[in-house]
Every structure is written in structure tokens, then in C-alpha cells.
Image (cartoon, rainbow, N blue to C red):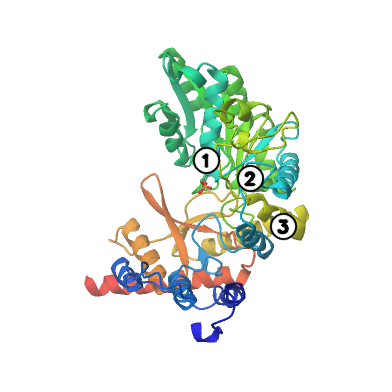
Amino acid sequence: MLNQIQLGTSPYAQLAKVMERYSEERTRGKVVDYQDYATLQNKLKALDINEGKQSWDTVWDMVETYLSYSVKTAHPQYFNQLWAGQSEAALVGSVIESLANTSMYTYEVAPVATLIETEVLNRLKDVFGFEQGEAQVTTGGSNSNYLALLLALHRQYPTLKHQGMHGLPKLAVFVSADAHYSMDKAMVMSGIGLDSLVKVPVDDTGVMRTDELERLLQASVDNGRVPVSIIGTAGTTVRGAFDDFASIATLAAEFNCWFHIDGAWGGAVAFSKAQKHFLTGSEHADSLSWDGHKMLGVPLMCGVIFVREPGNFDRVCNLGDTSYIFHQGAERQDLGPYSLQCGRRVDMLKMWLEYTYFGEAGFEQRIDTFMQLSALAENRIQAEPTLDLQAKRWINNICFRSVPPSGVDLNEYNKRIREKLYQSGDSLVNVAYLDDQLTIRLIIANKDVTKQDIEQFFDHWLMTAESVRKELQQCA
Ligand SMILES: Cc1ncc(COP(=O)(O)O)c(C=O)c1O
């Protein structure tokens, strides 16, 4: 492959050639050239990173190795994560961002980026119903959820800023049992601690049970714990379920606590007239997280948090002696003081170009197409006698499994099929657990995926299942 690239030209020209070639290759052939850990480690060890040859040939060799063994996440058989494929316009933003290499903290070093970020965030605030509020770019959903918890805590306990947790009562934070694990991390990082995280049971469609939430809120208060925040999810990680935001909002008001929505994944339905009903009640939320790098296909990372009441970021993030960096006057043009970060990438350049190319009508069409393709996948599962739909389909998460031959463990059987499929490089799909039951989680989030690709995925799955069945028969 390297021979096709004419060496000796400028690194920028080479880069353009590599990008051109890889953009084609990544959608063809195998999803991955699978190597086990030790084999790949040996291949990489053969490349001495400390030789310092000052040779571009060596650099491009390394690039080839990297690309050759990377998973092709834009491949139409890649259904593994809550993101897939890539929008070319946003990719241009990613490359240009690195080329111009600045940091978002001040207008002084990022003048155009400051205006772009402000404009994009204003647009997004309208879409997500936070017109009067504030928004901040984060390193992703985990970071947004963490920040939301800090905002909740500091609003409730203003003394926290200077005195820390000292003297605070025992606290409680409420999430659904299906919430993302970033909430557990947020509990640790915020200093509240895991023992104060109350995981509310979900119903059989994956929705947080608000009768249980109410009972657990009351029980916490009765036990001397003060509720700080309730976190609902818009599009849970495995099932794609949406919590009942209107009922959560009522309880949050009753128990006087911050209502956050983790919409990192499913928040994108806000762009679709047909789907945004899932967000009903979100107009009462104090904050909402959303990731542009998930359903919208913007290159990672592109996280945003929206907050209803302005002034919260200032309270938590605007600290310390910053005289060496922020030189602004009363005009307050710098965005840095309202972020958890100091140095920060210009992630909104990707989103700005994505907007410029597709517009909200384009985003809507994409989301609606994902839902149509997901309905097709659901129908195929229901039509196949050896496949089971394992959970209600909400959006573009499809949870299914193969029915094992009699006497074979269901979890082991499905795990083996998925592993074999991955190692073959034909398709890549994820595995998760609903209670103790293993489920295959298919995510349709690549804007270039077609009906044929979905059908092909199921053909691959069924063929692999058949071959695992035969292997098991031979062993028996
Ligand atoms: C519901 C939900 N919230 C948060 C996250 C974390 O997002 P990020 O990877 O951007 O930190 C995920 C990731 O899958 C998620 O599914």
C-alpha cells in the first residue's frame, strides 16, 4: 500500500493521499484484520519508536501499521458502538482544527473559534429547548454528567466551594439501574461517593420506575439523606430507552433537587419532528447532556451540556488566579472561565461544518433513516425463527440473541457467535447484559449504511451461528 504513495513530497501532500486512500479502504473488505493481543504487540514492538530517525518514510510506515490493524469504524458492517461512520464535512473540521492548533480558552488566541462555538451553541440551545439558558462544550457525555452533578451540588450547598464537603449532610443521587456508568464515576470524582448513588429499578422496557423513584426518594429523606439530583436518561446505552421526564420533573420539584437528563446518545431525537416526542418533559430539566459524536457522526469528541439557569458554570468553573491567561475586560468574550478544562480543542468547528453542510433538515433526515433501518432490522429478527428480539426497540438500539440448540448455555452460545464474527472481520456488533441475560446490541448509526448492509449483517450472524452450532455438535 505504501508503494502507491509517492514518497519524498511534503508531509501534507502525503497526508492528503493517505486520507484519500483510507477513506475508500475503510468501507471495503474486512471490518478488522483481527490479531490477538500478543501478536499485535509483537508487530508494534518491531517498530522502534525511540530511533528518532527524522525520516518521513518511518513516520508513514507507522501510519500504515496503525491504519492496517485499526477497526474500520466507517465500515458498513461496523455496528458496535453508539457511533459509526463519519461525516466528511465534520472530518474536515477535525483536520483543520489540528492544523490551526489553538485552544478555546481566550478570544485572544481563538477569535474565530470563539465566535463559531458561541453561534453553534446558541443554535443547539434552541434545538434542545434551552434558549434562555447556557451551554458548554465538554470532552463528552461522561464529563457532561460529572459537570451536571457538580452544578447540582454547588447550587444546593454554596459553602462547598470554599469549605468542601466538611459539615455537609449525607446525600443521595438517583439514577436508573440502566444509566450509564459515567454516573458512578461522577459520584467518585465529586466526592459524594458510590454508597450515595441510588439505582432505581427499571420496568421491562428499560424505563426508570417513577413509583420506585418516589419510594426511594422518601426513604432517603426518612433516613436523613438529602436528595441532590435525579438523573433521567434519554436513550439508555443498551436498550435506548427514554425515562418519563415529566414525572421525574414533578418529583425533582417536590424533593427540591436538580433534574439532569443524560441525553448523550438519544438526545439527538430533538432534531427529528417524528421522534422528539421522546423528550417530552425535558423542558423541565435543569440540565441535559448531548454528544454530537454519537448519532450525528461528528468525529469524536463533541460533547455539550445545556443548563437552564445562567450563572451555574461561573459558580463552579470560574476560579483561581487566571491573570496570566484571561485579560478580558467587562466584555467577557473568553469562554475559558466557564469550562472545567484549561486547554481545550475547538470541537465546535466540526459541528459548525456539519451544520454548514447538512443543516438541521439533513440531521433530521439522517435520524429518521436510522429509525427506518432499525425497524427493518427488528422485522428481520422477528421473521427469523432462531432469533429473539430481547427488548422493546425504542430508537436505533436493537437488542437480540440467537436461540441456542437444546442443552447449550444461551449466554455462552451468543458470546461465541459474536466473538467468531468479530475475529472473521465480517461484521462487528456489541454484547451487553440485561440483568444476567446476554444480549447482542446492534446499533445503526452510520449515515452511509443501507438496507442491504443490514440484511448482510443478519446473513453473517446466522451463518456464524450455524457454524458455532456445528462446532458444538462435533464436540458433543
Ligand atoms: C447514555 C450515555 N451517557 C454517557 C455516555 C458517555 O459518553 P462519552 O463516551 O462521550 O463520555 C454514554 C456512552 O456510551 C452513554 O451511552
- Classify mark 2: helix, strand or loop: loop
Mark 2 or mark 3: which is in front?
A: 2
Q: Residues within 10 Å of mark 2 (few under 14, many from 20)?
A: many
Q: Quadrant of the C terminus?
A: bottom left
Mark 2 or mark 1: which is in front?
A: 2
Q: Is mark 1 within 8 Å of ligand 1?
A: yes
- Classify mark 3: helix, strand or loop: helix
The residue that label 1 is drawn on is: 143
What's the amino acid at mark 3? Answer: Leu
- Going 55% across and 29% down the picture, which residue do you hit? 321
279 to the left or right of 1: right
Q: Examine the image and state in which quarter residue 39 appears.
A: bottom left
Measured along the vertical axis of the image, is residue 451 above or below residue 203?
below
The residue that label 2 is drawn on is: 104
Residue 214, percent from left and from top? 51, 22
Measured along the vertical axis of the image, is residue 336 above or below residue 77?
above
Using the numbered discs, state the Cα–Cα distance from disc 1 to disc 3 in whole angstroms.
24 Å
- Residue 59 visible in image: yes
- Residue 404 visible in image: no
Residue 8, percent from left and from top? 55, 82
What's the amino acid at mark 2? Answer: Met
Measured along the vertical axis of the image, is residue 254 above or below residue 419?
above
Residue 124, percent from left and from top? 72, 43
The residue that label 3 is drawn on is: 353
Using the numbered discs, state the Cα–Cα distance from disc 2 to disc 1 in whole angstroms.
17 Å
